[in-house]
Image (tube, rainbow, N blue to C red):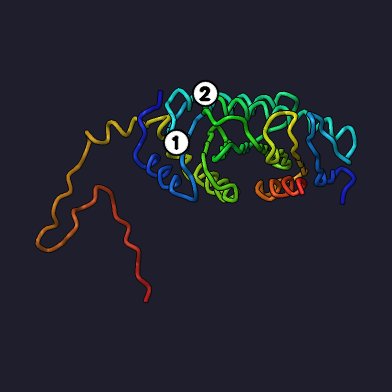
């Protein structure tokens, strides 16, 4: 492996509870996830508004080498409701990552 | 306002609409709706594509990020948005487990219909004149000989 080659981000898991994002991955990771989560949820709400679908219970964004998602558990989709999120530095099947985030409910 | 669509592009998208649990599709070039197969009014489709474009611009504004896929889950329906080049394909579907399959077929559709989209956006001038300048095909004579070509025909020798 060359010196310039950067390892992809490993899978990182986050929990959403009482409007707070928490993770074992460190404060910087939490801050970065929280920024993406809020942006993703905001535009999910906008889509829900224009199609009259309500608030999104999950959202995913994907880039060439990055996948991030969030999912609320059954309690509701308000910012205070419990949920989870995940990110990984590669393009992986979105359903697989959703399943991984949902597994944090157990 | 949607443009006049060539039947082949619409029929290709309608075939895709029958894949999996799809119940609506929207094909967009830049911010122009090409085909709307969503179960919603046109103005809702226009607002939807604006929001999806805004979302992509939001994540790109911080640097060199380029989000090419958004997927949202609502009560009873999922919204999948795929960007490729200057096209955007939005799919509404009901089974979460089909999302990766729908992403792949959606990208294949966008890849395979590039020429159709280009032909729609930039109709060739030849399309108009070619119908006027036509040459009827004559019947072959009794001896089934082909009419003489205007240029020289090169005979390719047969090596036995």
Q: Using the rendered view, name the quadrant where residue B10 is placed.
A: top left
Q: CA distance from mark 2 to mark 1?
A: 22 Å
Q: Secondary structure at mark 1?
A: helix
User: Horizontal placement of A84 versus B72: left or right?
Assistant: right
- Is the residue B125 above or below the residue B93 in the image? above
The residue drawn where x is 46% and y is 28% is B33
Q: Quadrant of residue B139?
A: bottom left
The residue identified by callout 1 is B117
In this view, the residue farthest toward the bottom is: B160
Query: In the rendering, at what x and y percent does residue B64 appear?
Result: 73, 30
User: Is residue B140 shown above or below A41?
Assistant: below
Q: Could you tell whether B24 is left or right of B137 in the image?
A: right
Kindly identify which numbered label has been placed on residue B98.
none
Which of discs 2 and 1 lies nearer the camera? The answer is 2
Query: Which quadrant of the view contains residue A76?
Result: top right
Q: Could you tell me if the residues under marks 2 and 1 are in contact, i.e. CB atoms within 8 Å? A: no
User: Residue A100 location in percent, x, y?
Assistant: 73, 49
Q: Give residue A96's position: percent from left, percent from top.
A: 69, 50
Disc on the earlier residue, 2 or 1: 2
Front position in the image: A82 or A37:
A82
Mark 1 closeness class: few <14, some 14–19, many ≥20 residues within 10 Å: many
Residue assigned mark 2: B47
Near mark 2 (Cα within 10 A), the count class, few <14, some 14-19 or many ≥20, is some
Q: Chain of mark 2?
A: B
Subunit that carries the residue with mark 1: B
Most foreground residue, B40 or A52: A52
Q: Is residue B84 visible?
A: no
Left-right relation of B102 to A75: left
Task: Mark 2 vs mark 1: tell me if same chain.
Answer: yes
């Amino acid at each position: 492996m060359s010196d310039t080659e950067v390892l992809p981000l490993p899978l990182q898991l986050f929990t959403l509870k009482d409007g707070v994002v928490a993770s074992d991955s460190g404060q910087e990771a939490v801050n970065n996830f929280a920024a993406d989560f809020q942006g993703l949820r905001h535009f999910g709400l906008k889509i829900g508004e224009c199609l009259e679908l309500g608030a999104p219970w999950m959202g995913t964004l994907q880039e060439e080498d990055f996948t991030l998602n969030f999912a609320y558990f059954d309690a509701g989709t308000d910012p205070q409701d419990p949920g989870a999120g995940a990110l990984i530095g590669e393009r992986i099947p979105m359903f697989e990552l959703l399943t991984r985030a949902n597994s944090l409910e157990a | 306002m949607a443009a006049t669509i060539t039947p082949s592009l619409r029929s290709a998208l309608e075939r895709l609409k029958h894949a999996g649990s799809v119940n609506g599709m929207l094909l967009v070039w830049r911010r122009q709706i090409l085909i709307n197969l969503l179960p919603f009014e046109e103005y809702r489709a226009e607002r939807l594509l604006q929001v999806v474009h805004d979302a992509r611009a939001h994540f790109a504004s911080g640097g060199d990020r380029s989000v090419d896929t958004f997927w949202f889950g609502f009560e009873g329906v999922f919204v999948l948005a795929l960007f490729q080049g200057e096209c955007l394909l939005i799919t509404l579907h009901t089974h979460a487990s089909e999302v990766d399959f729908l992403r792949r077929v959606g990208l294949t559709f966008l890849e395979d219909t590039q020429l159709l989209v280009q032909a729609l956006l930039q109709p060739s001038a030849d399309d108009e004149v070619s119908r006027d300048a036509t040459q009827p095909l004559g019947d072959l004579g009794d001896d089934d000989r082909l009419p003489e070509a205007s240029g020289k025909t090169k005979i390719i020798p047969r090596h036995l």
